[in-house]
Amino acid sequence: MTQPTSTEPRRALTLRDVSEASGVSEMTVSRVLRNRGDVSAATRERVLQASRALGYVPNKIAGALASQRVNLVGVIIPSMSNMVFPEVMTGISSVLDHTGLQPVVGVTNYLPDREEAVLYEMLSWRPSGVIIAGLEHTAAARAMMAQAGIPIVEIMDIDGQAVDSAVGISHRRAGRQMAEAIIASGYRRIAFMGTQMPNDFRAKKRLEGFEEALRRNGLALVDREFYDGGSALLKGREMTAAILRRSPDVDFLYYSNDMIGAGGLLYCLDQGIDVPGKVGLAGFNGVELLDGLPRRLATMDACRREIGQRAAQIIAARNQTADLEPEVVELFPTLQPGDTIRQF
Amino acid sequence: MTQPTSTEPRRALTLRDVSEASGVSEMTVSRVLRNRGDVSAATRERVLQASRALGYVPNKIAGALASQRVNLVGVIIPSMSNMVFPEVMTGISSVLDHTGLQPVVGVTNYLPDREEAVLYEMLSWRPSGVIIAGLEHTAAARAMMAQAGIPIVEIMDIDGQAVDSAVGISHRRAGRQMAEAIIASGYRRIAFMGTQMPNDFRAKKRLEGFEEALRRNGLALVDREFYDGGSALLKGREMTAAILRRSPDVDFLYYSNDMIGAGGLLYCLDQGIDVPGKVGLAGFNGVELLDGLPRRLATMDACRREIGQRAAQIIAARNQTADLEPEVVELFPTLQPGDTIRQF
DNA sequence: TCGCGTTCCGTTAGCGGTAACATAGCGCGA
DNA sequence: TCGCGCTATGTTACCGCTAACGGAACGCGA
């Protein structure tokens, strides 16, 4: 037996090293390490011991090239820092963990060009599937996905045309529903606050649905405010202050996400404003943060975890059974009225 | 020119396809696509056109195997959902973006065995480096990192022995500092709230440093409370309520993270408790969430972004220049007293 | 004893790129 | 005109592993 040489990593170990150390062919070592094919218990043990003793780590690059199989699933999302995608990731992982597939994350910062670049980079690793947020992509990105020959699942949104499969909610409908609930509770002078980001298509669709429902009821937004960057909670406070100063007669504040909604809520409570009597508030997403607020903000959960799970299931299924049809899965968010909408 | 066959992805394209379409050798195509070696402007253009027309995406698996170079950096962190690691990721990306290196994230959920598995999986892709949170790992994980022959940077913490390089702060010292500031402000009956997690070594070290400083001043914690799971903001409220009920004479609440600290602060304000007169509060991390709170929680920023940047810089430098020495970089968090510690 | 199916393991030929070297063609000074 | 040194391109030999097939050794029923 050679020296363990724990301090000298020099050349990376290969199957050949393990094969020599255990006196069998490389192929047999490969079989043992992948649990594939018949190997006697005795040799298996011998190989495993040699492998462990040497500290051998298989080279998946070579393996993937030879077998034409990669156990990676690309996940492309716009951001990691806003509470919503981490939960999607949790859903994805919870399903993938049982399948031998592994998620690899890429972040686009809501930039279409960056999305295209990340996608290109991912596809160049020949993953078993791709999960990507949204239905809006550059033409080139769309073409790449169509050509890739692997399952693609577009998540979060279903208001549009999917390249392949899709799992999400209708943000337009979500906006509409919230507007209807607000109107039904008797509010009439409604203002909106949201992000500046031109590429947050889902927020945009929610607002469209919201305004459409207002219009159908003979109403329109009385004021609106946008922000970008910075602490969302703080921005929520600031925008709310600005709106209430500018339009003191508003009776409802609709926020495009819970974080700024929470900021707005804290501001209103600070100011001693009667919530939901004088002013009602609502956000979107159903983040667990809200559970700790002094009053529960009205919101709609976006089914984030389930979206992740369903998307991962589609990839996994398509990977096991070829020729499955693309599918579009619509989920339905539930409205959580909380304590910031008047109840009758 | 053959049909574009936009609907028929069948067999994946290879260099050969592009080579045939453009009438040059595969090697030349490879050179063009990697911008390496001399190629005449004319052929370069021809190759690029053919490549684009076909929608060719290089196979990095084959490329990596042949060149023995992989532009990936493994990043192994315990969680994505607690505000702290996303910012580390931002720091890492901001540096790596300029280097051609790409981060690949793995999440361990604070489980050592899972960390070992994730590390094994990552190393099997032969990355150019690994950034991993913490200094505590299984023996096998430690051995793998020592053997890997690539730069390894352990981040967040420097209270311990690094395998290779490290970038972080001393959590023990951070705890000590906070305790000293609290004591200096005249608080004496101090309680602690934190996570249950036995594997959050950094939180544990902060508490150790904190208690040590108390001891040196003839003090000890008068009460403590632990939680796990659930909405941190809510847990902060609940634990704070429990402590104040159980030990009504406490005059300071030290939280192991800002999120539960924020929950505690909201609770105290709800209850009309005089903060910081009757009760002072402090957290840890310096999350931007705090900016939106009605009162600014005392905290210490953990240098998260800078940790990510420095770690990425080390990997990038080691990748360019072989034989650089391992380094341990200590960063120094600053105490932000906010509005929840008495000032004289 | 023969034949045949099992079990177990080895051999061969790539996977799709790239490093390293080979070579063709050209300009240009002696 | 020759030959040298470029530049632009092609050829060859892998990288480390696995699919597919081959074959030895053995057991067992006829």
Image (cartoon, coloured by chain):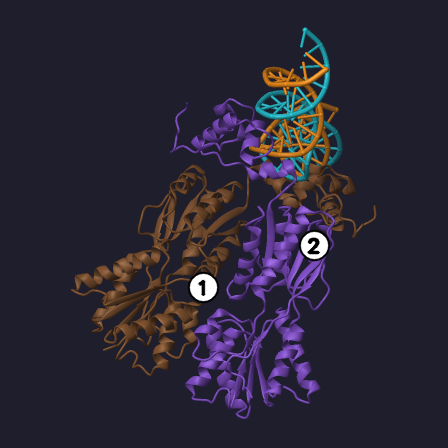
Chain colours: A brown, B purple, C orange, D cyan
Foreground of the two, A303 or A246: A246
Q: Chain of mark 1?
A: A
In the shown orientation, is residue A80 left or right of residue A210? right
Position of B305 compared to B67: left or right? left
Task: Tell which of A240 and A212 is nearer to you.
Answer: A240
* Left or right: A340, with B200 as reference point: left
Helix, strand or loop under label 2 = helix
Q: Which residue is mark 1?
A: A83
Quarter containing the C terminus of chain B? bottom right
Q: Of the residues shown, which amino acid type is indicated by label 2? A: Met
Q: Residues within 10 Å of mark 1 (few under 14, many from 20)?
A: some
The CA distance from mark 2 to mark 1 is: 32 Å
Residue A119, image x and y in percent?
47, 45
Task: Return the x and y of residue B1 as percentages of the image width and height.
Answer: 41, 23
User: Is residue B117 among what the camera can see?
Assistant: no
Residue identifier under label 2: B145
Using the rendered view, name the quadrant where residue A259 is placed.
bottom left
Identify whether B80 is placed above or below A43: below
Outermost residue toward the left?
A: A218
- Amino acid carrying label 1: it is Met
**Residue visible at 39% across and 73% down in the picture:** A263
* Chain containing the residue with disc 2: B
Disc 1 secondary structure class: loop
Give coordinates of residue A250: x percent, y percent.
24, 73
Of residue B235 and residue A67, the one placed in the foreground of this image is B235
Residue at x 40%, y 72% (from the top left corner): A290
Q: Are labels 2 and 1 assigned to the same chain?
A: no
